[in-house]
Image (cartoon, rainbow, N blue to C red):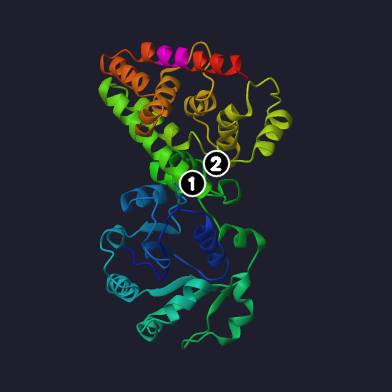
Amino acid sequence: MRIPNNILLVFDDFDPVTNYKIRLVEETRKIETINTIIFLYEAFKGQSDRAFQQDEKVALLSATLPNTLSPSYIIDGDSFTNTDLTIFQKIQLQKKKYKSSSLYLLLDTKEYQILEQSSEWPLILTIVNLVVYVLPEHKELVHTYSFTSKPIIFINPTDEINALSKASLLEVTKSGFNQTLIDYMNKSDECAIKRIKSHLSPERFRHSLRVAGTIKRICELLEIEDMELRYDSYISALYHDICKEIPRETQESIAKETLAWDDYISWKVLHGPIGAWYLRNKYLFTNEDILEAISQHTVPNDDPKMITIFLFLADKLEPERQKEYPNIYKDAWDLIERKLPMEAFNFLISYFEELKATKNKFQ
């Protein structure tokens, strides 16, 4: 087996996987001959608030990396499972594996500053050559960086790479994610929870989680065998109120100027279609069933899909709703337990239409 001469080590937490480090690899190859690139796990930013499990990260990274023979791209799966090792220990293992090769460590200046504070930093410098990308906020500090026996290789900053360095699952359109990753994120409940938490008040966030739990219960009671329907229903429940707390004036403006919709019965129903529009444009959602369910959960059409029916039911029958209409709540659940979701749906539609008519009568 041919032993690679120059190996570039790329550490990241890959949560989410982005094109940032891949672009840095490409820039490194313009400066230095690199035969092999090895991706290893390291939580520079800490391990809290994750959106993806370790095995998901490996799978998504595999789907993101270029498929080339030269240079070769390798994922060190052990580093994703054995997260107790320090970065120095991980580098040591690579050196033992590739004794005659030269190791290069790719860092940006934020990661550099973190490692520089480590007691293992002097030991790391004895094993690797450094390749460093200078982030805009650190450009004045470059002259203070330590040097090994060989000078640090600096990557010239660009606006494109600077933008990629800020990639976030909350800013999909600006992050340069590939379509595989976008689709995966949009089917991830952990991503959904992180996103809605950033949009909603604690009370509305808890409501969304209760609706998601309720829709799972409905699918279980109905013994739904279509697992895709089950999961899509769950995701739709998490996102259904993502635009609920946008100010009234903004919602009405979006409805009229962007959605060309000005015959709505009340501004309070707008967050459904606006939420679907928002997910399509902000997070690049393409699942039409999920989008339709969210759009119609406030005002379903005359022939709704099952996912829309489930979302409507879950929204009206989450546990806290029992206080608002206890008898109706119980009767609707009785119908669901008898495996009559359409009857429960029509029952609730009739109840809310009568309630609205009564309110209008006394106004």
Is residue 25 shown to the viewer in this render? yes
Q: Which residue is mark 1?
A: 195
Q: Amino acid at mark 2?
A: Tyr
Location of residue 284 by image quarter: top right
Residue 74 relative to residue 160: left or right: left
Callout 1: SS: helix
Q: Main secondary structure of the magenta part?
A: helix
Q: Nearer the viewer, residue 197 or 201?
A: 201
Indicate yes or no whether the magenta region holds residue 347. Answer: yes
User: Residue 283, which numbered label?
Assistant: 2
Residue 177 location (% of width, % of height)? 53, 48
Q: Is residue 354 positioned above or below 113 on the image? A: above
Residue drawn at x 69%, y 20% is 263
Residue drawn at x 52%, y 11% is 302
Q: How many residues crowd around disc 2 within 10 Å: few (fewer than 14), some, or many (20 or more)? A: many
Q: Nearer the viewer, residue 175 or 329?
A: 329
Bounds of the magenta span?
345-351
Contact, CB < 8 Å: mark 2 with mark 1?
yes
Residue drawn at x 54%, y 20% is 299
Residue 267 relative to residue 317: left or right: right
